[in-house]
Image (cartoon, rainbow, N blue to C red):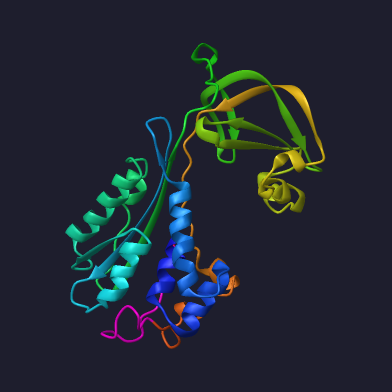
Amino acid sequence: YMALSMLAEATDGASRSQILELLGTDSIETLRPQVKSVWNANYRDDGVSKSILASSLWLRNDVETAPDTTKTLAENYYASVFSGEMGTESYNQLLCDWLNEQTGGLLREQASGLHMSPETVLALASTIYFKAPWTDSFYAGLTREDVFHGPDGDQTVDFMHRSDTTAYYWGEHFASVGLGMENGGVMWFLLPDEGVTPEALLEDEDAMRFLLLPRKTDWEQQKTLVVNFTVPKFDVSSDLDLIDGLKALGLRDVFDPAASDFTPLTADTVEIYVSQVK
């Protein structure tokens, strides 16, 4: 949302209109206070929990850019603005350092593989950093090794254990429970029924309706039970190309060098277009 909002500021014409329609807003003037509200509503850094959004704009130093646009991005989107020689090791390292600084070093391995090519005119980077302890911590003495059956085979990992009297929800193909975090967050666990794959569950309308329901108390199929949690400790990472998905959602012109309009950003280079969204 933040990166697309910044992209709307850098574009005009049909390019901007398609982005605004996807974001569900009618004008760039309406979007600016909405983005500020999103940033502030998600901000927390109180020594217990942390939730921080960050954005940045990376410019090529031999391309003249409109100062009003970069100023708007800095003031309304809280974006850091950088300028340097695209494709150089030092500029790529600066991007990696920024990403690591915003995410507590958790994406160090992923960030090390990112680079901007010499042809790049503009790069936008947007991060989310979230950290919160459980409301009721797992007792370390109950943690023990067990086998996790993953898509790439079995692995021996540490499992945390606890029992809680809590709300238990279910649908046609899944069961679900939530574990609370300090300052109001909840992690939701969905367990597919026997024989139902995670991929099938992601395409299940009932499961998606449950995940997107703002108040789980409105879900019809629920009861209070003693739930035994067996939760593996895990890291997860992924690398996704989002262009096809964004095209399916209605963004077309920004990916077409003959149709894209980046005049609010620069008039110095023609046929600028979005070449990568990850």
What residue range appears in magenta? 262-277
| Quarter of image, res 229 | top right
Q: Nearer the viewer, residue 176 or 18?
A: 18
| Quarter of image, res 172 | top right
Q: What residue is drawn where x is 49% and y is 57%? A: 240
Q: Is residue 1 visible?
A: no
Asked whether residue 272 is drawn in magenta, I would say yes
Residue 193 at x, y percent in the picture: 76, 37
Q: What residue is drawn where x is 43% and y is 82%? A: 12
Q: Quadrant of the C terminus?
A: bottom left
Q: What residue is drawn where x is 21% and y is 66%? A: 83
Residue 222 at x, y percent in the picture: 79, 34
Q: Is residue 91 left or right of residue 167?
A: left
Q: How many marks?
A: 0
Q: Nearer the viewer, residue 214 or 130?
A: 214
Q: Nearer the viewer, residue 184 or 262?
A: 184
Q: Nearer the viewer, residue 2 or 202?
A: 2
Q: Is residue 211 left or right of residue 268?
A: right
Residue 119 at x, y percent in the picture: 27, 74
Q: Is the magenta region chiefly helix, strand or loop?
A: loop
Q: Is residue 88 left or right of residue 170?
A: left
Position of residue 185 relative to residue 97, above or below, is: above
Residue lying farthest to the top in this orientation = 141
Position of residue 174 relative to residue 37, above or below, is: above
Q: Is residue 30 left or right of residue 186?
A: left
Position of residue 217 relative to residue 159, above or below, is: below
Residue 43 at x, y percent in the picture: 42, 45
Q: Is residue 267 visible?
A: yes
